[in-house]
Amino acid sequence: MKKFIYNFFNITDEQQAALEKVRQDTHAAIKPYFEQIKPLSEQLQATLLAETIDTAKAAELFKGITDIEALIIPIEANAKVQAAQILTPEQRADIKGVMTDVTSFIKYIMAYPGLDDLRNKYEKRIQKAMIDSKLDFLNLTEEQKTALIALQDTTADAMKPVAEQMGALHKDFAEALLAATVDTEAAATLISQMVEPTIQMAGIKFNAELEAAQILTPEQRQIIQDKINEHKNRFKRPAK
């Protein structure tokens, strides 16, 4: 896919090399943070699937993760600023034009007159079928299925305004990067504004995961943990 994008937008070999350096430097910068996040994420997962869920511990682990993620966000965003400056004004204009066309096409589809009717007709049916197919090994009760579907709905409602805020920020960020001259000042301001809604979105997802875990019985949570352990053992590298 990366090679296709380079060819599509006529990115030169020299530019590709410079972009690759930005990618490698960024990876090196954020790798230590991800190494810190990994054990916290594993502990959080184990806490949510424990026989008795320690909500205070889960919240503490989640905060530890998001505190680190807040440090990663500006590093990744600044890498995009660097990448944009490697491109020529013409290439940035070309990318902006393609993005505009794709966005217009998506808006056209989303404006389909009967879309809301289709959503109302099939949404609950799709949700139930997804739960039945993905979680059939848990033998969920009808009450649990109903509770999980309701949780999906309340979570989606909570995420919507935050997603809209993040979408607006990313749209403005893209415009700053794809301008004839990259607007680094505007980009820096927008990067500083990205952290809060990103962490807020993570918080909504965490609360949903916590509530979903509480809907399950201790036995069902153990079944999930056993499957996770089985998956880990299957792909564990043999000791040298």
Image (tube, rainbow, N blue to C red):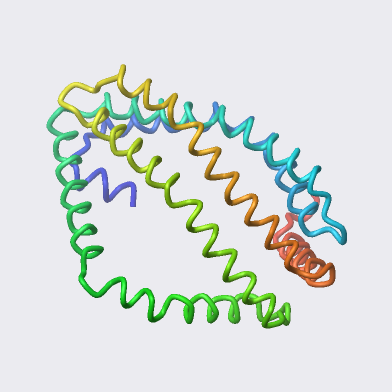
Name above or below for residue 219 compared with residue 164.
below
Instruction: Find residue 190 and report its image quarter.
Output: top left
Q: Residue at x 73, y 77 (%)?
A: 138
Q: Can residue 52 be seen in the rendering of this structure?
A: yes
For the residue pair 104 and 212, the one nearer the viewer reads as 212
**Rendered location of residue 67, percent (x, y):** 63, 31
The spot of residue 221 in percent (x, y) is 78, 66
Q: Residue at x 37, y 20 (%)?
A: 188
User: How many labels sit on residues?
Assistant: 0
Image vertical order of residue 28 relative to residue 207, above or below: above
Q: Residue furthest left?
A: 90
Give residue 115's position: percent from left, percent from top: 28, 72
The percent coordinates of residue 24 (x first, y second) are 47, 31
The residue nearer to you, when weighing 192 against 95, is 192
Which quadrant of the figure has residue 30? top right
Q: Is 40 rendered above or below residue 50? A: above
In-image side of 110 versus 165 (left or right): left
Q: Is residue 157 shown left or right of residue 41?
A: left
State left or right for residue 119 relative to residue 126: left
Taking the spot 74% from the left edge, 48% from the top edge, the residue there is 44
Q: Say whether residue 25 is visible.
A: no
Residue plotted at (47% across, 27% down): 74
Residue nearest the viewer, comparing 150 with 73: 150
Task: Tell me: 131 left or right of 144.
Answer: left
